[in-house]
């Protein structure tokens, strides 16, 4: 079902209940689809199996020994532009 933004604001609990029992509720602004209200169950199904940002960051390419060594031997002090 589609809701104009003002109606969705005024009847938010009804929008949420319909999302829970009937499926996603579309909210429009000036006739344009703007948002979708989902039940928590539908959202969980949508997100299931998708990696998180942390998974993506930790799942990057492995460092080979040469790269790890280069990082370890780099100078520990700032290289430029720092005055003490």
Image: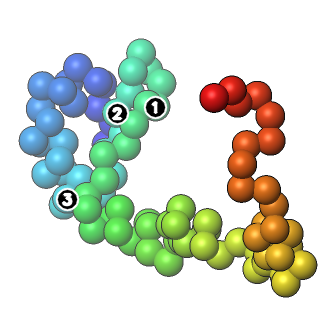
Q: Which image quarter: residue 22?
A: bottom left
**Distance between the alpha carbons at the discs numbered 1 and 3:** 20 Å
Q: Which image quarter: residue 59?
A: bottom right
Mark 1 lies on a secondary structure that is strand
Is residue 22 among what the camera can see?
no
Checking the image for residue 33, the label placed there is 1
Q: Is residue 41 above or below residue 13?
A: below
49 left or right of 73 in image: left
Color style of the picture: rainbow
Q: Is residue 77 above or below residue 62?
A: above
Asked if labels 2 and 1 touch by Cβ distance under 8 angstroms, the answer is: yes
Q: Residue 44 in the image: state x and y as whole percent.
A: 35, 68
Residue at x 83%, y 76% (from the top left corner): 69
Q: Residue 81 in the image: state x and y as whole percent.
A: 76, 28
Residue placed most toward the observer, 49 or 70: 70
Asked if labels 3 and 1 touch by Cβ distance under 8 angstroms, the answer is: no
Mark 2 lies on a secondary structure that is strand
Q: Earlier in the sequence, mark 1 or mark 3?
A: 3
Residue at x 23%, y 20% (from the top left corner): 6
Checking the image for residue 27, the label placed there is 2
Residue at x 81%, y 68% (from the top left corner): 73
Residue at label 3?
A: 20
**Distance between the alpha carbons at the discs numbered 2 and 3:** 15 Å
Residue placed most toward the observer, 45 or 53: 53
Quadrant in the picture for the N terminus: top left
Mark 3 lies on a secondary structure that is helix
Q: Earlier in the sequence, mark 2 or mark 3?
A: 3
81 left or right of 10 in image: right
Residue placed most toward the observer, 22 or 58: 58
Residue placed most toward the observer, 81 or 50: 81
């Amino acid at each position: 079902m589609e809701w104009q933004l003002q109606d969705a604001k005024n009847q938010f609990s009804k929008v949420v209940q319909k999302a829970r029992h009937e499926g996603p509720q579309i909210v429009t602004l000036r006739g344009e689809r703007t948002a979708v209200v989902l039940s928590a169950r539908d959202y969980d199904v949508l997100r299931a199996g998708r990696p998180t940002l942390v998974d993506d960051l930790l799942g990057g390419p492995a460092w080979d020994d040469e790269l790890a060594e280069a990082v370890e031997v780099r100078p520990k002090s700032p290289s430029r532009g720092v005055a003490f």
